[in-house]
Every structure is written in structure tokens, then in C-alpha cells.
Amino acid sequence: MTRKPQAPRRRGFHPGRLLLGLALLLVLLGAGHTMLWRLMTERLEQGFERWAEARRAQGWQVTHAPPRRGGWPLSASLILPALRIAAPPGGPLGGLAWQAAAVRLRIVPPDLQTLLVEAQGPQRLVADSQELPFAAAHLTAALPIAEGASPGSARIMARQLRLGPPAGAVTVAEAEAELEGRDGPALTLALTLHGVALPWNLPLGRQVETASLEAALMEPVPGGYQPARRAAAWRDAGGTLELRALTLRWGEVAASAAATLALDAALQPTGAGTLRVAGAAEGLEALAGAGLLAPRTAGLARSLVPLMARPDPAGGPPQIEVPVTLEDRTLAAARIPVLRLPAIEWGR
């Protein structure tokens, strides 16, 4: 009996070879990722050093302890311990300095067009030898670094912000600000604050629920080292500050305003706008009770508020809408003087 010839054995699936291939692939991917991380951190450090050298050439002081690279594997970061940045003496920001225990510069893939600047630990701001300590549980600035991005643009976010010494600090639960330099307005600012706790006993209370501001500086501030001359040059060039929206919810008062401000011949703010207030009667009584309004002014306002109140289209409490002016350092609402402002001392 003859045997049939056996068919050649085919090579079957071998799990060991697959695991080896996967291991080699992971090694290659890890090596490539590590090289990319090193490249990104090197460029991050080089970019900061170029920025610092450019500022030093302009007279700024930029100091820090030896930097440390980090962030692997999810991001590329550069930590700058004991960072201190001070404006040049005699310049427009002379005497202004900022210091933080550490600052982390970070880029998080896949977004390679945004630089995150995160302040860590205690911080302090010094202006004209006056120190303002502050700290935050979270303080981050997002800066666009793509080619063609506006150099003055930034988005700043903070949580549990504390301004001032511990015994009398102003605290802010959440804050967000957006700065943007444009071809039209020289600078625009949008600022929103939530949960502002004040250390003083004020007529409307110590807690401001929300406050927001949208403003635009319509003419760039000229260079130079004398504040008074710079302010005069800005005024003479037609400089204005547009308060496009200013809102406040404080106790029983909810207010919104819009105005355009400039500088008068004495370099004091002047302008006009519109104020809308809900809870005006309650706010009036609080100010009068605190002695911030003269009895005659308070009496006149009490008689006018009911006549000026209008229903809120959104169904809220009645509102009043009045024109406001600022002239000769006197703030007036509906031609009634409300507040006398202190003079701004620009220095020479």
C-alpha cells in the first residue's frame, strides 16, 4: 500500500512574531515622540530667550533661575523659577515690576499655535515702590503664536484670585479677560468678573455678583517717557476710550452703561453716555443712608426715580434710563451731580 505524498505545511499564525512587531513599533513611536518633545522644548526655550533678549535691549529687566524642561509625554513645557520682569526706569511703565515664584510656558499638541503661560505660587506687583501681593489658584494666559497673529492679543483666565494683603484682600472667584490689538481700535478689552468679595462695608454690600466691561482704545498711546506729555499727545491726536458695555450686579442693583471718554484741557477725563439701572430706588436709599449723597440731591432723586421708571421688556424689575456726563471731574446723572472725582496727577 503506497502512501499519498503529504502537502507542504503552511506557516500558521505566530503570536510571538506579532507581539515582537508591535513592540518594535511602540519603540519607534516612543523614540519619535521623545525626539519631537525635545525639539519642541528646545524651540520653546530658544523662543523665550529671544523674547527676553529683545526686552533687555529695550531696557527691561528679565531675570529667572535656571529653567527646567518638562511636560513629557503630553505637552512641551518650560518652567522658569523666580521670574521677575521690570519695566525700564523712566519709561512709560517705569517702576512697574512683576514677580512670580515660577512661570510655566506650555504647548499642548495638537494645538501648536497657542502658547500657555501659567503663573505658579505667590506673586507680587510693584508700582512706584507700592507693592500689591496677589495669588490665584489658577492663572493662565493663552497667547497666539501663529505667524501673523496680533502681538497684543491674549486671553487671561483666573480662579480664586486674591488681590492685596491677607487682612484686606479683594477676592474674585472667576475672572476672564481678552485683549486684542486691531487695525481699527488700538486695543480692545473684554473683562468679566464673577463673585467679587470686598473687604469693606459698602452701602450696596460686600459682595458683587458679576461685573463686566467691553472697551476699546481708539487711538494708540504715543511713546515717550513723560506721562503728562504722552497723555496730551494722545488727546491732541483725537484719542478716545469707548466704554461699549459696562454691567454690574451688586446687591439689589443691576446697572449697565455705555459712554465715550476723552481728556479735557487739564488732562482730566471727560465724556458722556447712558446709564440704565434696575433697583434704582434701593440703590438710592443705600447711598443716601451712607451719606454719599447730599440731602437735597437725595430728595430730588427720590421724586424723579418713580417718574423715570419704565417696564423691562424682558419681564424684570422696572428700569430707569438716564444720560450721564463727566465734566470738570463731576459725574452727573440726568444733570444731577452725583460724585466729585479726585484729580489725576500725571507727573512731569
Image: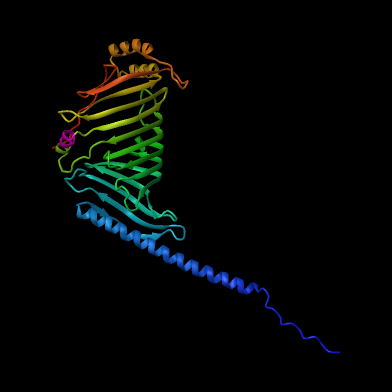
Where residue 125 sits, quadrant-wise, is: top left
Where residue 105 sits, quadrant-wise, is: bottom left
- In the rendered image, residue 217 lying in the magenta stretch gets the answer no
Count of numbered circles in the view:
0
Vertical order, 93 against 29 (above or below) = above
- In the rendered image, residue 234 lying in the magenta stretch gets the answer yes
Range covered by the magenta-colored residues: 231-237
The image position of residue 213, as x and y in percent, is 35, 33
The image position of residue 129, as x and y in percent, is 22, 42
The image position of residue 68, as x and y in percent, is 37, 60
Of the 4 image quadrants, the one containing the N terminus is: bottom right
Q: Is residue 67 visible?
A: no
Q: Which residue of the protein is positioned furthest toward the bottom in this rendering? A: 1
Along the line of sight, the residue nearer the viewer: 224 or 144: 144
Q: Is residue 240 visible?
A: yes
Vertical order, 337 against 35 (above or below) = above
Where residue 339 sits, quadrant-wise, is: top left
Along the line of sight, the residue nearer the viewer: 280 or 232: 232
Q: Tell me which residue sits at (27%, 55%) in the image.
A: 51
Q: Tell me which residue sits at (28%, 11%) in the image.
A: 296
Vertical order, 224 against 2 (above or below) = above
Vertical order, 176 against 284 (above or below) = below
By secondary structure, the bulk of the magenta-drawn segment is best described as helix
Along the line of sight, the residue nearer the viewer: 313 or 250: 313
Of the 4 image quadrants, the one containing the C terminus is: top left
- Report the side of 85 relative to 176 (left or right): left
- Report the side of 263 relative to 178 (left or right): left
